Structures are given as structure tokens and as C-alpha cells.
Image: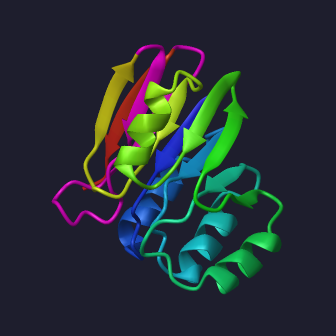
Amino acid sequence: MRIAVLSDSHDHLQPLASALEQIGTAEAVIHCGDLVAPFVVKRMAAALQDVPVHIVWGNNDGDHQLIGHIAQQHANLHLHGLVARLELGGWRVAVVHYPDLGRDMALSGQYDLVCYGHDHTAHQERIGDCWLLNPGELMGMNGRSSFAWVDTDKDEIAFVDLM
């Protein structure tokens, strides 16, 4: 299974649009928080109509009520709150926004993949049998705008730079 992992879009529409163009072939999408505004969710829903999208809250996400209302209108959008626990491609996957929580989850031995965001830094690390992954930031605040592909069949992670 090919999973696209995004984080920290912070309303930056150009890198979001570029990522959405490239991830239409994903079998699932994960967003690790900090969408920020409800219109980001609308754009994701429009671009990824047939792809399940799993979203957790970040510390900068604004109008939870409106974001939730938009998500309810799209069967492919799944808001999980602060933590998502999923099975994707036969892998046990956890998603959180915060790096320290992600590391603790990876260390638990309960997951094959743990995804996080928040610190805007692309990172992949093997902890036992678990991948710990930060796809980097879409917004490009630190000069690099990126997302990641996870291939569960090949047990591989690849970063995609957008800018």
C-alpha cells in the first residue's frame, strides 16, 4: 500500500496544491496536524475524493467545529482527534502531532509506523521494527517543503521536496 504522509500545511496553498497533485495515486493519506483553516480540508476533500484521508489535530488548528462539519460531508475524510490508531496495508499505524508522543509510541513496540509533525523537520528513523516518521512541513517555513511516501509492501519511505 502507498500512503502519502503530510503535516504542517498552515494554510500555505501553493505547496498544498503541489502535494495534492502528486498524491492522487495514494491508497491512503495521513495529515499529522496543523491544517489551520477549514478551507485546507475542503481542498483536500476535493482533490482526494476517492482516497481515505486520516487527520489528527495539531496545536494551530483553528475552527474545530467547522473543520469537523466539512469532514462530515465527505465520506473519505476521517478526523481522529489528537491520536489516530489505524491499520493500513497490514501495518499498525499511529498518528500524532507531537514528536515526543510519537517517539514514545514508536518505543512501545505496538506499531509498524508512527507519524508525527509539529517541529517542521523531515525525519525518518527505525526504532526496533517501527518506522518513526515526520514528513516535514508543507508550508516551507524552514526553506524545505516536503511530504513523504510510505510503501508498506516494500517497507520503504521516500521524501518528496516541493520547493
Answer left or right for 85 relative to 132.
Answer: right
Rendered location of residue 103, percent (x, y)? 39, 37
Rendered location of residue 131, percent (x, y)? 44, 25
Q: Is residue 143 above or below residue 13?
A: above
Looking at the figure, which quarter contains the N terminus? top right
| Residue occupying image coordinates x 71% and y 21% | 90
Q: Quadrant of residue 64?
A: bottom right
* Residue nearest the observer in this picture, 119 or 71: 119
Q: Is residue 24 visible?
A: no
| Residue occupying image coordinates x 44% and y 64% | 16
Point out the stretch of residues depicted in magenta.
128-154
Answer left or right for 43 relative to 6.
Answer: right
Q: Is residue 110 above or below residue 8?
A: above
Q: Is residue 19 above or below residue 129?
A: below
Answer left or right for 72 relative to 93.
Answer: right
Looking at the figure, which quarter contains the C terminus? bottom left
* Residue nearest the observer in this picture, 128 or 160: 128
| Residue occupying image coordinates x 36% and y 20% | 126
| Residue occupying image coordinates x 55% and y 46% | 95
